[in-house]
Amino acid sequence: MTISIDGAAFAAVLDALPARLRKRLDASVERAADWAREESADGANLLIRVDEETAVTVRVTAGVVVSAEDVSCVCLLAPACLHRAAVASILPLHDASDVPAAESLAESVTTDARGGAQSANTEKTDAAPSESASTATSAPPAGASQTLSVRERAAASALWDSAVAVLTAGLVGASRFTEAELARATHQARAIGLHRASAAGVRVAAGLRSARERSGEHRLGRFTADLRELMLVTHQLTHLHEGAEQTDELRGMARRSYQEHGSLRLYGLFTEPVVAGSGYAGVVSYAVDVDGVVWSTATIAPGGRSLVRPSYISSLKLGGTTLTHREFGRAGVMVSAATSSADRRLGGGTSTKAVRTAGVEWSRAPVAGLFDQPLSAQFARALAVDPEDGSFRAGDDLVFLRGRVLGVGAPGLVLGLIEPDDDVPEGGDTLEAREARMLWCVLPEGSAVYQRNFERLAEVGPELRVIARPDRAQPGTVHALAVAVEAEDAAALALPEEWQGRVNLGIDRIPLPDEDTQDAQDAQDARSSEATESTATAEPVEGAESQETTPVEDPSAAANISARMPTAESTSLHLLRHHIEHAASAGRAITRTALLERDCTRLDAEAMHVAASLLRELVVQAAPARDQFARPIDTEERPKNGYARTWLAAAVYEHAAATELAVRQWSRAMR
């Protein structure tokens, strides 16, 4: 059983440590990882033996250490001893929301694929909703006060101060005591109902710990984004005007609010795997109703990649149906007394009932309507949304494409696009006919399943319908999630009949030409753990060793194909992002660098004067004003929180500018 510690309890344990011992805490924590552990049969107590004479007892309530008194030591210095503090420090911080949103996790995995990274974005909660619509929410009731109380403002202010301390110290300089103060403030914010701020605080604290532990899943860009979100929300809360309409949005919700929708007729679209660095995994399935609205449902649980396949072949948590995720993506379902959250995630209330019905091909209504939307409009919508924003809905970040496979290369599959209202050109689909509209369907790093599927698709070169997510950083690049092919191409690919010509690229494995499809599928289900773990290790699947990368249709064009692809516009905005991330990593003291003025000059030369101005102001604020005794003082030019506010302004500007730039570049690429 995984045991975690409440943030307030963790802070209280460290508070008891005297100043003379605090510098020795890190060394004690390293030793604590090797101390012997004995868990009681009922799981209520954990005994950690330091040596033959010393032991620390941890009392657990439902897997959580809820108070500082639950960590006790038998040594003479207790409770002000290093043993107690070290044990508390090695326990993961408890997140009261603790069940991540499938959509957020799916976006995390998508982000991982873009950068070959593993990260976890668990701001939202509730992976597999089963509550009724009347009990699933902790949101403020209708007509709740639009004014923050004194306690709420105090909690937001304390969380802001903790975030400023993290920014000032940076990842390199932040100590366990910095983390403890952040955990305490996060706990207080959650207890008082500031759920959005507390969720951001949890993610920042997790980033601090993963950086300290040198985890391979830590990503500076993700930590910087989480810190920006935390500081932005707490700054807005502490400066909120009386009667402001956005109060509820800034407060956030502890859990999703599920509302009844009556009856829904849903048609399955596809299923994608979810693996998060925070220790959750599973699948998310998407469906569309008769009006063309996209909905989602998920099965997420604590674990790793080995949970993906079992979740895929498990029953939906929807109205008592026995339909599995694999079947749901290719079938239909009629749901009565359906419930969903605001982001269109289906709930499993006690009154909800679901019955299996026939599915529909992607080339027929209502699914076909998704593919008939203009490409420019689809990419503009998908690139403009922010999955962390409260207005995000299931399917907002997806694009629905038609095209023909032109080949496969190092980055992935080459797809020649077909405009929704275009006919196939005379003479067939050739590389020359499609070269003005091509996309890379990139290969996620270390994904043997994707690689095998891409190679098989390139061998046949079928016309496809593709559901994908566009890559903001690289115009002309998408992350393909699922494809559908015509009947003759499905036969050429030897797809099982029950797949109905659809392939969930991250889970299904297209059989080899001489492979029995049913035997291959049964073997994949039986080896669910091994099959999904191979995705993590990038070991080739059976039969893949003899397959070579398939060339594009026109071999003479292979060397020039990358040049034909849309390329990102070269700007110096990345310089601002570099300094923002550098400040978050190294802290305030490292902000003043010799290269900064050179970068400001480059930004000015490209007419990015706001970015240059923010960067220069960041340098000014990085050096605090001091009195004659070298003590920091508050002045009009350099106020107490001037550095933090300037960093926040620069981070918010860079995020907005990068989003707008991505949309503009993609719009040009899709003309």
Image (cartoon, rainbow, N blue to C red):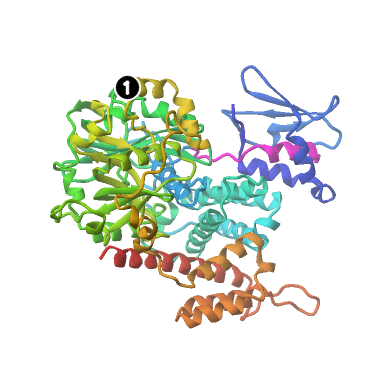
Number of numbered tags placed on the structure image: 1
Q: Residue at x 25, y 39 (%)?
A: 484
User: Where is residue 161 shown, x and y percent of the image?
Assistant: 61, 60
Q: Residue at x 41, y 36 (%)?
A: 547
Q: Secondary structure at mark 1?
A: loop
In the picture, the quarter occupied by the N terminus is: top right
Indicate whether residue 186 is drawn in magenta: no
> Which is more toward the observer, 293 or 365?
365
Figure check: 180 above or below 618: above
> Which is more toward the observer, 624 or 468?
468
Figure check: 622 above or below 510: below
The residue under label 1 is 516
> Which is more toward the observer, 45 or 49?
49
Indicate whether residue 94 is drawn in magenta: yes
Residues in magenta? 79-98
> Which is more toward the observer, 634 or 558?
558
Figure check: 521 above or below 183: above
**Furthest residue toward top:** 41
**Which of the 4 image quarters holds residue 333?**
top left
In the picture, the quarter occupied by the C terminus is: bottom left
Q: Is residue 27 left or right of residue 335?
A: right
Residue 142 showing in the rendered view: no
Pointer 1 local density, CA inside 10 Å: few below 14, some 14–19, many at least 20: few
Residue 389 showing in the rendered view: yes
User: Where is residue 67 shown, x and y percent of the image?
Assistant: 65, 36
Q: Residue at x 42, y 69 (%)?
A: 657
Q: Is residue 661 left or right of residue 19?
A: left
Q: Residue at x 33, y 63 (%)?
A: 666
User: Where is residue 158 shown, x and y percent of the image?
Assistant: 59, 57
**Which of the 4 image quarters holds residue 249?**
bottom left
Q: Is residue 499 left or right of residue 169?
A: left
